[in-house]
Image (tube, grey):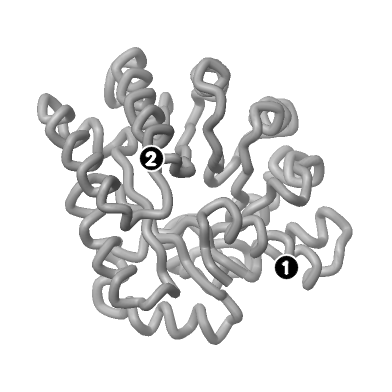
Amino acid sequence: MIDTHCHLTHARFASDASEVLARARAAGVEGCLTIGTGIADALACHELARVSEGYVRAAAGLDPFSSHAAAEGFDAAFEALAALHREGTFSAVGEIGLDYHYDLDPRPVQAARFERQLDLARSLDRPVVIHVREAHEDLTAILAAHPGHRGVIHSFTAGPEEAERYLELGWHLGFGGVVTFRNAEEVRAAARLTPVDRLLVETDAPYLAPVPHRGERCEPRHVAATLAVLASVRGVPLEELDAATTVNARRLFGWPS
């Protein structure tokens, strides 16, 4: 198993990050992609990846929240992000995307900032990790207008119709704890139709702990519970799906065996 999306530099892991990683290893997790949102967090993720000797890899982007926080300083933050990526130390650009649930910035501003980071990923030939909430129509339109990218729609929580649009555009779908929730049948339907070579598993730790860990702080080790539900939903052996999603993660993010 590889947890393709977690936030190991989050304050909720400040006191026991090494223990969290030890528990992940013990649970069979072969690696974690920790996501830096904003420049300070990107630097923290880079340092964690450096000291983890390949077990942790890092991504970095200006998501809708860190973009909003940058305010008038977004251009400077973008240049700092680009400089970090040009050093070649990050496995992906992201998370980046659109969030219409909170609408922190006007939608045209969100789109323009997202597109700039898409262009950065293309210039670096790097995969993209995408955050989307209540913005699927606009996001698919932007992705269709920017062909040739590769990456993942992280924490996919929509249904089959939206899934098919992203799959037609060549994107992977990342499923986390939501797929285990009782009221998430539409998400499970999307998971059933996703080609096995386009499927990833994640936790989004410390958020969205899967059943049976609801109410707990989510950790990378909990990706095993999500993987078990995905295997059941798809009617395949757990070991088979484990192997396939691990290969997918290694291929997409350039993770060596």
Question: Residue most toward the right?
Answer: 235
Q: Is residue 45 left or right of residue 152?
A: left
Residue 61: mark in rendering: none
Type of the residue with mark 2:
Leu
Q: Is residue 223 above or below residue 179?
A: below
Question: Residue most toward the top?
Answer: 108
Position of the C terminus, as image quadrant, is: bottom right
Q: Is residue 206 visible?
A: no
Is there a contact, CB below 8 Å, between mark 2 and mark 1? Answer: no
Crowding near pointer 1: few (<14 within 10 Å), some, many (20+)? Answer: few
Count of numbered circles on the image: 2
**Residue 209 in picture, x, y percent from top left:** 52, 61
Type of the residue with mark 1:
Ala
- At 52% from the left and 82% from the top, the residue drawn is 25
Q: Quadrant of residue 194?
A: top right
Position of the N terminus, as image quadrant, is: bottom right
**Residue 184 in picture, x, y percent from top left:** 68, 44
**Residue 26 in picture, x, y percent from top left:** 54, 86
Secondary element at tag 2: helix
Q: Is residue 138 left or right of residue 14?
A: right
Q: Is residue 121 left or right of residue 214?
A: left
Which residue position holds label 2? 124
- At 55% from the left and 75% from the top, the residue drawn is 30
Residue 243: mark in rendering: 1
Please tell me whether mark 2 or mark 1 is closer to you in this view. Answer: 2
Q: Is residue 28 visible?
A: yes
